Amino acid sequence: MKRISEIKREIKKFYKKNDIDHILTSLLSIPLKEIYKDEIIIDEKKEKEIISAFKKIKNGFPVPYITKKVSFYDLEIYVEEGVFIPRPETETLLIEVIEFLKKERFYPERILDLGTGSGCIALFLKKFFPDSEVFGIDINKKACKIALRNSKINNLKINIICADLFSAFKTKFDLIVSNPPYIKEDEFKKLPKEVKKEPFEAIFAGKDGLLFYKKIFDEGKKFLKEFGFLAIEIHPFLEEEIKRISKFKMVKEIYDLSGLKRGFIFQNL
């Protein structure tokens, strides 16, 4: 049995980052303020679990797979190994998409999130368009189960379908949104260890990184209504190639907080 302060000192011997308290609150399921109470006593079994978790993180295991959750806008998104971890860049993209659509006075009846993963995009869109019918599709069965779990956690009803891209649909959508895989072959080898722990199929996009953009543009034409919008997250260094293969009219470019181009909004004209 050890006090929480003793365990923190032990962790700091091999883990030097500043997020120890944040991770501990998740592992112990307690509020942050409780971490600072020295009287918290941890039994030996739990102590071993905590030390083991921090050693995994030190060796490149993603923190969200340990804490089992990430914040996405004001949603709580459950994640675990085998599903892609939502990123702040995607939040930025979606906020810009919402602002753009509101200025256009465009309120979609049917929305599709291609490659939904944890369901974060579909849930975000359902939150802002509560009257819309929102679909999330993913070929990863585990991701589909987690997306449904996140639907319940956030009390937002979305339709989750386990299938490849547009294969499950016959009708069209007013809005299609996607954060597709876009890492090309030569980049994959250079990715940080923690990113390589995420699902390969959610990251890798063939030799040139354009595999899924090509599919979305080719098939999307059949499933996006006339005057409908397609919003996609992009690899900032594939901007020109993505523009070149697009079959839609570009109506907006979106930048992330670091000034890199991170998304495009197209219209089906």
Image: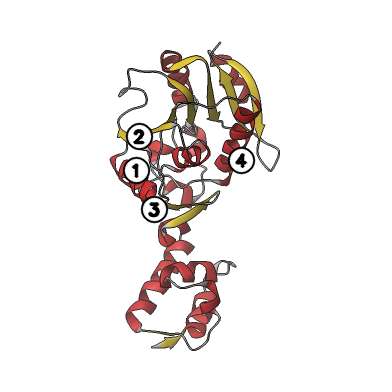
- Can the viewer see residue 31 in this picture? yes
Q: Residue at x 42, y 70 (%)?
A: 29
Q: In the rendered structure, which amino acid carries the disc numbered 2?
A: Asp
Q: Residue 92 has which mark?
A: 4
Q: CA distance from mark 4 to mark 2?
A: 22 Å
Q: Secondary structure at mark 1?
A: helix
For marks 3 and 4 on the same chain, the one whose residue lies earlier in the sequence? 4
Q: Residue at x 46, y 85 (%)?
A: 40
| Residue ID for mark 3 | 153
For marks 2 and 1 on the same chain, the one whose residue lies earlier in the sequence? 2
Q: Secondary structure at mark 3?
A: helix
Q: CA distance from mark 3 to mark 4?
A: 22 Å
Q: Residue at x 32, y 41 (%)?
A: 144
Q: Secondary structure at mark 4?
A: helix
Marks 2 and 1 in Cβ contact (< 8 Å): yes
Give above or below for 201 relative to 250: below
The image quadrant of residue 41 is bottom left
For residue 259, side relative to residue 24 (left or right): right
Q: CA distance from mark 2 to mark 1?
A: 7 Å
Give the image location of residue 58, x and y in percent.
48, 63
Q: In the rendered structure, which amino acid carries the disc numbered 1?
A: Ala
- Count of number-bearing discs: 4
| Residue ID for mark 2 | 138
| Residue ID for mark 1 | 143
* The furthest residue to the right: 259
For marks 3 and 2 on the same chain, the one whose residue lies earlier in the sequence? 2
**Disc 4 residue crowd, few under 14, some 14–19, many 20+, Cα 10 Å:** some
